[in-house]
Image (cartoon, rainbow, N blue to C red):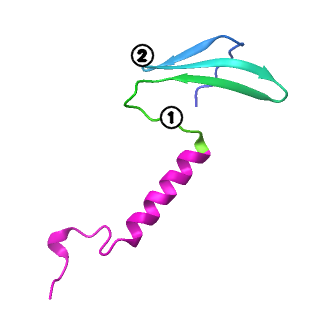
Amino acid sequence: MLVLSRKEDQSIVIGGEIVVSVVDIGRGRVQLGVTAPPHMTVHREEIHRRIQEERQLSVSRRPHAGVPSNCVATA
């Protein structure tokens, strides 16, 4: 993990396309602004985790989840 120090109104650039800016610092929290291309999704970690869990649950509920169609026996 890369750890950087930034002050309010300073930013970092990731991959030339994503900019993370420190918007405000105070009261035990830091507000960040994220600018990213429209094709990229940006979520808080807990939201991302929930989305992944829901996707996994959805896949596991499908009949024959994870089994290639050519391996499913048919009657």
Which quarter of the figure is the N terminus placed in? Answer: top right
Please give the name of the residue rendered at 49% of the width and 59% of the height, measured from the top-left corner: 54
Q: Is residue 65 magenta?
A: yes
**Dot 2 amino acid type:** Gly
Q: CA distance from mark 2 to mark 1?
A: 16 Å
The picture quadrant where one finds residue 26 is top right
* Whole-percent x, y for residue 38 in the image: 40, 27
Please give the name of the residue rendered at 14% of the width and 89% of the height, measured from the top-left corner: 75
Q: Is residue 49 magenta?
A: yes
Q: Residues within 10 Å of mark 2 (few under 14, many from 20)?
A: few
Q: Residues within 10 Å of mark 1 (few under 14, many from 20)?
A: few
The picture quadrant where one finds residue 37 is top left
* Whole-percent x, y for residue 44 in the image: 59, 39
Q: Secondary structure at mark 2?
A: loop
> Is residue 62 toward the left or the right of residue 41 in the image?
left
* Whole-percent x, y for residue 34 in the image: 55, 24
The tag on residue 42 is 1
Q: Which residue is mark 2?
A: 16
> Is residue 8 toward the left or the right of residue 56 in the image?
right
Is the residue 6 above or below the residue 75 in the image? above
Q: Secondary structure at mark 1?
A: loop
**Dot 1 amino acid type:** Val
Please give the name of the residue rendered at 15% of the width and 84% of the height, measured from the top-left corner: 74
First along the sequence among labels 2 and 1? 2
Please give the name of the residue rendered at 35% of the width and 71% of the height, measured from the top-left corner: 62
Q: As rendered, which of 7 and 63 lies closer to the eye?
A: 63
Q: Which residues are magenta?
A: 46-75
Q: Taken as a whole, is the magenta stretch helix, strand or loop? A: helix
- Disc number lying in front (2 or 1): 1
> Is residue 55 toward the left or the right of residue 7 in the image?
left
